[in-house]
Amino acid sequence: MSVAIKEEMKISIARDFSSTPGSRNIFEGAYSGEEFLIKILEPKFQSILQSDNTIEIDLDGTEGFATSFLEEAFGGLARKYDPKLVLEKLYFISNDEPLLIEEIKSYIQDARRK
Amino acid sequence: MNFFRKYSRYIIATLIGFLAGFLLQKIFHPFFDEKLDPIELAGIVLTIILALYVEFVIRPSFSNKESVRNVILQQVTTIKEQLIGIHQVFIASREKTPLPENEKMRIVSSFRTLSNEINFLKEIIEYSRIAPTQTRFQTIFKEYLKYKKNVTGFRFEDPTFSYDRKFFIKIDNSHKEFMKTLIHLIIELNQS
């Protein structure tokens, strides 16, 4: 009998990407939301799609996030995949700015309304 | 049950007072009127109970509500001041083409401070469990997101970004709406 073990992948934006997250699109400059989505978030998201696993996203340790970065990274993922699935699979940690979690969730929920 | 535990000392003191009264009446009965009017006695008992109830139940509950209301008012005022601060930074930087990186950083970090102040308000409201204020908080959060999106959304981090006339009107309108929700909450709290 096989038992499915629920594992959690971790992404720290400050450690794995940048402590100064930048613009919305790649052509606007370094460390954009689009770059984070393509290089880090989406590949990890795809790798857990067929499993029960979730991704823990640590938002702490950065200089702060502009709406453009967050909307493009997380809203962008919800435009490619089912927003409900994105909300189920992503788990956020934000001690520096707790309200950021609700903010990101609102971008995921509203992503398809654009 | 909690009422009796909390005010047991006062209840015991009242009972001792009654007992002492009856004993005194027994000992020095020639000095007291033998006839005891039950209506008068009930009146005295009710007056004492009412006085104790007002003093130890109603008044503390009013003052608790008032202090919670004051904490919320103070927090909303802090948020209002933060919002004015961010808007002043925006107004000072809207003529700059492109918007300098240090100004962008200042705006983003100011939003972090504002976000944390709003989160603190959320925690106070959740703790106080004042239902209408909870509903009002959702509007405040919605207006905050709208304002932040207008100030730091679009191509904000693009090195060539600057606020043009179109942005200015949008940002100014969302700032007014955000401010309006805060003022509505202040009025509501003052009227409650």
Image (tube, coloured by chain):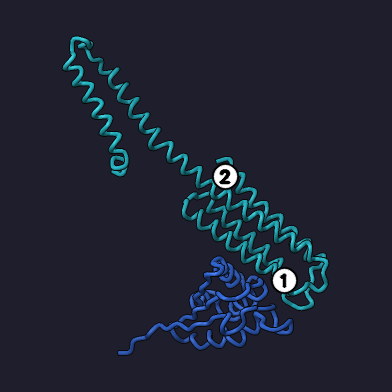
Chain colours: A blue, B cyan
**Mark 1 to mark 2: distance in Å?**
35 Å
Q: Which structural element holds mark 2?
A: helix
For the point 29% across and 17% down, the residue is B40
Q: Residue A65 appears at what percent x and percent y?
A: 63, 73
Give me the chain letter of mark 1: B
- Residue at 64% over, 52% down: B181
x, y (%) of residue B101? Answer: 74, 74
Identify the subunit bearing mark 2.
B
Q: Quadrant of the C terminus of chain A?
A: bottom right
Q: Nearer the viewer, residue A75 or A55?
A: A55
Q: Residue sitting at 58 percent across and 77 percent down?
A: A78
Amino acid type shown at disc 1: Lys
Residue B86 image position (x, y, % from top left)? 70, 61
* Residue under numbered circle 1: B104
Q: Examine the rendered structure and indicate whether residue A26 appears above or below residue B163.
A: below
> Hey, which quadrant is residue B88 in on the image?
bottom right
As drawn, the label of residue A97 is none
Can you identify the residue that label 2 sits on?
B189
Write the residue at 57% across / 76% down: A61
- Towards the viewer: A17 or B147: A17
